[in-house]
C-alpha cells in the first residue's frame, strides 16, 4: 500500500489566531524498514498514539530493528513569515524525522517531547512526512532511556500525541508556571525557539485567568533572561488575585496565556493549565497548602503495562483510563500513585490534575544509564513537559539504586528550574519493605531496600513506603515467576486459590495498618497496574479491559479509610476469660477535626458475639488518637475474633480485627507420666513443670531412670553438665532412648559445631539474609497426626506471642551430620527444617528449633510489644516434646 492511498492532512494558518495546532493523531501507515532507507511500500496501518504491536495486519515490534511511520501533508501556501513545527510528545526508542526523503533531524529521547522545524524544507504542496522509530538496542550509549530489569519486552512506537504547529515568525517551545501560594503569585518561565531572533525584538507577555475565564492577574511583560536549551528564556512574576488553592478536595485549575510578538505583530500564543498549590517537607511529613498530607495509594508501571499482550490501545482509550486511573482508585480511598519506571501518556496527568489525584513521577532509571549531559538535558525537558501539572508533587530520578553524579550534580542543578517540588533520593529515600512475604514478618534491621522499622519510626524526613506486599498472581491467580517458594512459606505445600486470595487481602490490611500506625508519610503497596504476564502482574481479575478488581482492593479500601482505625495487638494466642488490652489507633488523614465512636466486639468459636459500649473519639486534622480498649476473651476455646468498628455518626467508615486462638487455661496437658531428664540453663522448663506438679528428673541428679527421655534446652549442648554426660547420653540413645535438643543455635555468633553424641554433630551458622529469607514466624507440621502436635492445629504455628514479628525459627542454618527426617518445615519453599528427627542406633534425636524460650512463664509482664511472653501453644508444644 503506497503513500498515495493516504488522505493528506491539510495544513494552513488561521489568520484569526497566532497559532494553529493541527492534530496528527489517527491512522498512519507503518512498515518495517532499514536505518536510513524508508520502505518503498507500507503494508500496515496503525493508530497513533500506540506502539508497533497495535498495527493491522499485526506486527510484533520484533520483526526488525527499525519501523517507519508515514503521513501525507497538504500545505496550503504558507506565508514566508510563518513557521511550521512538528511536535512529537513521546516516541520510543530513538527518532528520525524525514520529509520528502530529506532528513529533518532526530533524537534519542524516549519519554520527553521533541520538536522539528519543517518550514525550512517545505512551504506548500503535498509532502511525505516519515518518522522512524528504533528498537531499544539501537539507542546510542549516551541515551538516558533507562533500565528495567524486570521488563522483557520493549516495543517501539509513537506512544504520545503528534501535531503540527503553525505560528508566525516566533515559536513558543515551552512554558513552565511555578506557583507561590504563600505569596499569592506565580512565576512564568517561557522558552521561545532560538531561530536567530534578536531577544530584544521579541515581546513576551503573560496573563492568568481563572476557570471561568475571568482575569486572575494583570497582564505582565516577561524579561529576557538568557539563551539556554536552544531557546530564548523569558521570565515574569504574576500576582494572583485571591488565589484558590489546588487540592485533592478542590482541584481548581488556572490558565496562563502566553504570547510572543515580533516587531509589534503577534507571532505565537499558547494556553497552559496550572494549579496554585504548595508542596513541601516539614520534618517527617509532607504538607500540602500548609496542611499535613498523608499519601495512600499504589504504583502504576505504565511501561510494563505496555508489554502486556492484552493491553492493545487501552492506555490511550480515555474512557478506560478514567475508570482505571480515577474512578476505581477514588472509590478505594487512593489519593496517590507513583508512575513506576517511566512517564505515562500525558493525558493521564491531565486527568489527575482535573480530579485531584497526587503523583510521584519516576524516571525509568533502575540504575542510571547514559551520559550526564544527556541525562541533564532529558531531565530538563521532563520538568518542562510535566512541571505544569499540580498533581505531580514529587520528582523521582531513581528506583532501588543510587548514583552519586545524579544525586549530587544533576538534581541540584535542576532545583533552579523547579524549586517547588521535593526529589526522591535527595530529600528523602523511599523504602521497599518486602516483609511478611519475601522477607521476615517484621524487620528490625536493614533488609533489602528498606531500613529497620524502628529506624523508620525515628526518621527526621518523610517515610515513603512505596513498595511492599510481595504477593503477586496473574489475572487467573497463577503465581508469577517472583513467587517461587514464597507461597509455600506462608500457606504451606497445599493451598487453594481461595487461600491465596484471602492471604493477599490479609497482608494488605495487616501491613497498611502497621504503616499507618507508624504514620508513614506515603503508603503504596505494589502493584496496582502492570504487565499481567510480568513478574508482578496487577490487581485485576480476568480480561484487563473489564477492570474487575481483585479482593485486595476491597481490603485496601478499608485499610485506607481517611477516617480509619487499626488495632495494635500482636498476640495470636490467648486463654479463656483472659483480659486483653487493645491499643486502637484512630487515624484522620483529612484537613478537619473528625468525631466518631469506636465500637468493640468479641466473637467466639461457638458463634456468640458480645458488643461493648461505644467509645467516643475526637481526632485532630492530620492526626491520630490512641484509644485503650479492654476486652475479655471468650470462655469457649477455639478461634475468636476481636474487632473494632469506627462509626461517623450512624455510618460505619472502617473496621479492624484480630484473630486470637483461645485455649482453655486448665487444659494444658502432658501425655505421659514418665519423668523426663531435663537440662535447661534458662530454667523455664523446670519452672513450668513444677507449677503444674509434673514430675521431672534434674540433669545433675543421678541415677537417671532407665529409658527416660532426655531434654536439653537452649544453649544446653555447650553446657558443662552436658559435656560431662555426653558419652552416657550417647549410650542411652543408642539403646533406644529419645534425646530432645531444643534451639541448639541459641547464642551462636559465628559458625559452630556441637557434638550431640559421639557420632552425631550439629553445624549451626547464622545467615545474613540480605534481601530474602530472614527468621520465620510460620511453621508447617509435615504430619499433623504425629504425636508431637497433639492438642494443637497447624494454624496455631503461625506467629507466636512476643518476639519481633512473632518469631518462631531463627535466621540460622542448622544441619546434622547424619540423615534426618523433617517433622515440621518453614522458610522460603519450606526448605528449612523447623523440627527434625535423626535415627541413632535403636533410639532417636529430635532437634527442635521452634522457640519456646521466654514463652513458658505465665506471670511475666511487660509493656514492650516485642518482648517474649507466655504463649499457650509454646507451652503445649513443649509438653508434647517431653511426652514423645
Image (tube, rainbow, N blue to C red):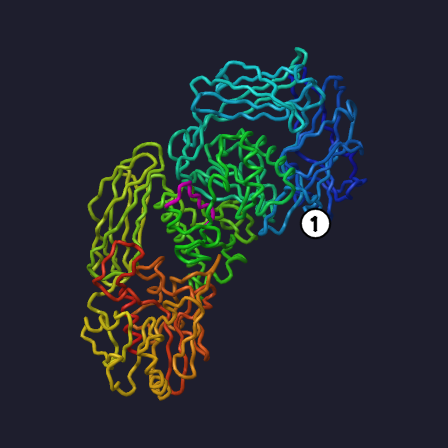
Residue 390 sits inside the magenta stretch: no
Q: Quadrant of residue 386?
A: top right
Number of numbered callouts drawn: 1
* Secondary structure type for disc 1: loop
In the rendered image, residue 230, in percent from the top left (x then y), is placed at 67, 27
**Residue 24 visible in the snapshot:** no
Q: Position of residue 472 (x, y in %)?
A: 49, 54
**Residue at left 56%, top 29%?**
417
User: Dividing the picture into quarters, in which one does residue 669 lie?
Assistant: bottom left
Which residue appears at 51% of the width and 61% of the height?
484
Location of residue 770 with respect to 141 vertically, above or below: below
Residue denoted by label 1:
62
Left or right, 316 with respect to 673, comes to right
Instruction: Identify the main secondary structure in magenta.
Output: loop
Residue 465 falls inside the magenta stretch: yes
Residues 551 and 871: in front is 871
Q: Is residue 464 above or below residue 775?
A: above
Would you identify the image quadrant in which residue 166 lies?
A: top right
Amino acid at each position: 500500500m503506497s503513500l498515495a492511498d493516504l488522505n493528506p492532512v491539510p495544513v494552513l494558518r488561521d489568520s484569526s489566531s497566532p497559532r494553529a495546532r493541527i492534530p496528527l493523531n489517527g491512522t498512519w501507515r507503518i512498515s518495517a524498514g532499514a536505518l536510513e532507507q524508508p520502505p518503498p511500500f507500507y503494508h500496515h496501518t496503525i493508530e497513533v498514539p500506540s506502539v508497533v504491536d497495535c498495527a493491522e495486519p499485526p506486527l510484533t515490534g520484533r520483526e526488525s530493528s527499525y519501523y517507519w511511520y508515514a503521513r501525507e501533508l497538504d500545505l496550503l501556501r504558507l506565508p514566508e513569515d510563518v513557521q511550521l513545527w512538528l511536535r512529537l510528545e513521546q516516541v520510543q526508542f530513538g527518532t528520525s524525522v524525514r520529509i520528502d526523503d530529506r532528513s529533518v533531524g532526530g533524537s534519542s529521547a524516549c519519554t520527553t517531547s521533541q520538536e522539528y522545524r519543517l518550514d525550512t524544507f517545505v512551504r506548500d504542496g503535498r509532502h511525505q512526512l516519515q518518522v522512524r522509530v528504533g528498537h531499544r538496542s539501537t539507542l546510542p550509549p549516551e541515551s538516558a532511556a533507562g533500565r528495567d530489569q524486570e521488563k522483557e519486552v520493549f516495543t517501539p512506537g509513537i506512544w504520545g500525541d503528534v501535531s503540527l504547529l503553525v505560528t508566525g515568525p516566533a515559536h513558543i517551545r515551552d512554558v513552565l508556571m511555578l506557583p507561590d501560594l504563600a505569596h499569592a503569585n506565580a512565576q512564568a518561565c517561557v522558552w521561545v525557539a532560538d531561530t536567530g531572533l534578536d531577544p530584544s525584538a521579541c515581546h513576551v507577555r503573560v496573563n492568568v485567568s481563572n476557570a471561568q475565564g475571568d482575569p486572575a492577574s494583570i497582564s505582565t511583560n516577561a524579561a529576557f533572561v538568557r539563551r539556554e536549551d536552544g531557546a530564548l528564556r523569558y521570565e515574569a512574576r504574576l500576582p494572583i488575585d485571591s488565589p484558590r488553592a489546588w487540592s485533592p478536595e478542590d482541584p481548581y485549575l488556572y490558565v496562563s496565556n502566553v504570547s510572543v510578538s515580533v516587531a509589534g505583530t503577534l507571532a505565537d500564543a499558547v494556553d497552559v493549565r496550572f494549579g496554585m498549590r504548595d508542596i513541601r517537607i516539614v520534618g517527617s511529613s509532607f504538607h500540602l497548602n500548609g496542611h499535613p498530607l498523608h499519601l495512600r495509594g499504589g504504583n502504576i508501571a505504565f511501561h510494563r503495562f505496555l508489554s502486556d499482550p492484552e493491553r492493545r490501545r487501552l492506555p490511550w482509550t480515555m474512557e478506560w483510563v478514567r475508570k482505571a486511573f480515577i474512578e476505581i482508585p477514588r472509590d478505594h480511598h487512593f489519593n496517590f500513585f507513583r508512575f513506576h519506571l517511566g512517564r505515562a501518556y500525558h493525558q493521564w496527568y491531565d486527568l489527575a490534575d482535573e480530579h485531584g489525584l497526587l503523583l510521584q513521577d519516576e524516571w525509568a532509571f533502575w540504575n542510571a544509564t547514559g551520559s550526564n549531559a544527556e541525562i541533564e538535558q532529558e531531565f530538563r525537558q521532563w520538568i518542562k513537559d510535566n512541571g505544569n501539572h499540580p498533581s505531580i508533587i514529587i520528582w523521582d530520578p531513581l528506583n532501588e539504586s543510587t548514583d552519586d553524579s545524579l544525586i549530587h550534580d544533576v538534581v541540584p542543578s535542576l532545583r533552579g528550574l523547579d524549586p517547588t517540588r521535593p526529589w526522591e533520593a535527595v530529600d528523602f529515600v523511599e523504602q521497599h519493605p518486602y516483609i511478611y512475604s519475601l522477607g521476615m514478618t517484621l524487620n528490625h534491621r536493614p533488609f533489602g531496600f528498606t531500613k529497620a522499622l524502628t529506624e523508620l519510626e525515628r526518621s527526621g524526613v518523610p517515610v515513603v513506603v512505596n513498595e511492599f506486599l510481595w504477593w503477586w498472581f496473574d489475572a487467573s491467580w497463577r503465581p508469577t515467576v517472583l513467587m517461587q517458594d514464597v507461597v509455600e512459606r506462608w500457606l504451606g505445600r497445599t493451598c487453594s486459590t481461595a487461600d491465596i486470595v484471602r492471604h493477599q487481602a490479609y497482608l494488605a490490611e495487616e501491613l497498611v495498618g502497621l504503616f499507618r500506625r507508624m504514620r508513614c508519610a506515603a503508603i503504596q503497596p505494589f502493584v496496582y497496574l502492570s504487565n499481567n504476564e510480568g513478574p508482578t502482574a496487577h490487581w485485576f481479575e480476568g480480561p484487563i479491559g473489564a477492570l474487575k478488581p481483585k479482593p485486595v482492593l476491597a481490603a485496601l479500601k478499608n485499610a485506607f479509610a481517611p477516617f480509619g482505625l487499626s488495632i495494635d495487638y500482636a498476640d495470636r494466642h490467648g486463654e479463656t476469660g483472659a483480659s486483653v488490652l487493645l491499643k486502637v489507633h484512630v487515624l484522620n488523614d483529612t484537613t478537619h477535626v473528625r468525631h466518631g465512636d469506636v465500637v468493640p466486639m468479641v466473637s467466639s468459636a461457638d458463634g456468640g458475639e458480645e458488643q461493648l459500649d461505644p467509645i467516643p473519639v475526637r481526632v485532630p486534622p492530620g492526626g491520630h488518637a490512641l484509644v485503650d480498649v479492654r476486652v475479655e476473651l471468650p470462655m469457649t476455646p477455639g478461634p475468636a475474633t476481636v474487632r473494632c468498628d469506627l462509626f461517623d455518626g450512624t455510618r460505619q467508615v472502617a473496621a479492624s480485627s484480630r484473630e486470637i486462638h483461645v485455649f482453655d487455661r486448665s487444659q494444658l496437658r502432658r501425655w505421659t507420666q514418665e519423668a523426663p531428664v531435663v537440662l535447661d540453663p534458662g530454667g523455664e522448663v523446670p519452672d513450668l513443670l513444677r507449677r503444674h506438679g509434673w514430675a521431672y528428673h534434674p540433669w545433675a541428679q543421678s541415677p537417671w531412670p532407665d529409658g527416660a527421655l532426655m531434654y536439653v534446652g537452649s544453649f544446653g549442648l555447650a553446657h558443662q553438665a552436658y559435656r560431662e554426660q555426653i558419652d552416657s547420653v550417647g549410650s542411652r540413645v543408642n539403646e533406644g532412648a529419645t534425646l530432645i535438643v531444643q534451639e541448639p543455635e541459641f547464642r551462636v555468633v559465628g559458625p559452630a559445631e556441637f557434638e550431640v553424641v559421639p557420632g552425631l554433630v550439629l553445624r549451626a551458622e547464622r545467615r545474613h539474609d540480605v534481601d530474602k529469607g530472614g527468621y520465620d514466624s510460620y511453621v508447617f507440621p509435615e504430619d499433623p497426626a504425629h504425636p508431637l502436635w497433639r492438642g494443637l492445629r497447624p494454624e496455631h504455628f503461625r506467629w507466636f506471642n512476643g518476639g519481633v514479628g512473632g518469631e518462631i525459627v531463627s535466621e540460622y542454618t542448622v544441619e546434622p551430620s547424619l540423615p534426618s527426617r523433617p517433622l515440621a518445615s518453614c522458610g522460603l519453599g519450606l526448605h528449612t527444617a523447623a523440627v527434625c528427627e535423626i535415627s541413632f542406633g535403636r533410639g532417636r534425636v529430635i532437634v527442635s528449633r521452634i522457640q519456646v524460650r521466654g514463652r513458658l512463664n505465665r506471670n511475666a509482664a511487660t509493656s514492650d510489644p516485642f518482648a517474649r511472653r507466655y504463649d499457650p501453644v509454646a507451652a503445649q508444644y513443649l509438653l508434647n516434646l517431653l511426652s514423645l
